[in-house]
Image (cartoon, helix red, strand yellow):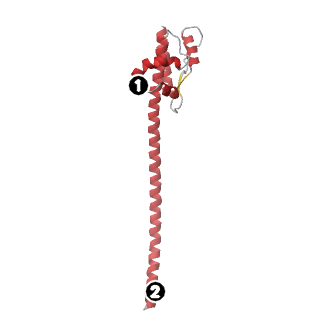
Amino acid sequence: TNTMNLQTVARAWCRLRHMRRPRFRLTLLISVVFGCALALVLKGTTCIYEKYQNTISSVQDYYAVSQVADMLIDHIKTHQGVPPRNWQDLEDAYRRVNLGYNNFSMAELRARVGVDFDELALRLNALSGKVGHQDEGRVISVKNSRQSEVIEAEANQRLWRVLEKGRR
């Protein structure tokens, strides 16, 4: 009977071992599929978060560029057509214009927005007829944005539109 029991146990063990392999393969397959699905969900979540961050950054860039355009317009109007030479010249305009925005400090604006003060002076001279430079230029730019062309174009066009209207 001991031999019978041993043979029975051996057969049962073989059956269990064969049954465990397909279950192991199924478990492995399910684990791999679940892992891939989880990786895709995490990648999708990361992409959505990056898009959200880019959108927020673009909105902030828009407000910063718009504020700087208003500061330039204010300075030029206040100083009878004389353009600012640097950021320090815009300090008074910042205090006047910032009442409507109240979003960024002057340091944040300088870090976020670039202004070509030399180009501004050149373009203003062209508007007054002193120099034959007719096309509108890119005076205001966003420093750290991938989607800045539209934001910059709108602010620069508004700047030149207001200044041309003031010259007439």
State how many labels appear: 2
Residue in view at x 44 percent, y 90 percent: 2
Q: Residue at x 45, y 30 (%)?
A: 60
Residue 161 visible from this viewpoint: no
The residue labelled by disc 1 is 102
Q: Quadrant of the N terminus?
A: bottom left
Q: State the image coordinates of residue 18 (x, y, percent, origin top left).
A: 47, 75
Seen as rendered, the residue at the extreme bottom is 1
User: Distance of mark 2 from mark 1, alpha carbons?
Assistant: 87 Å
Q: Position of residue 104 (x, y in %)?
A: 45, 27
Question: Disc 1 marks which amino acid?
Answer: Asn
Q: What amino acid is found at the position of numbered circle 2 in the picture? A: Gln
Viewer-nearest of discs 2 and 1: 1
Identify the mark nearer the N-term, 2 or 1: 2
- For the point 47% across and 66% down, the residue is 25
The residue identified by callout 2 is 7
* Mark 2: few/some/many CA within 10 Å (<14, 14-19, 20+): few
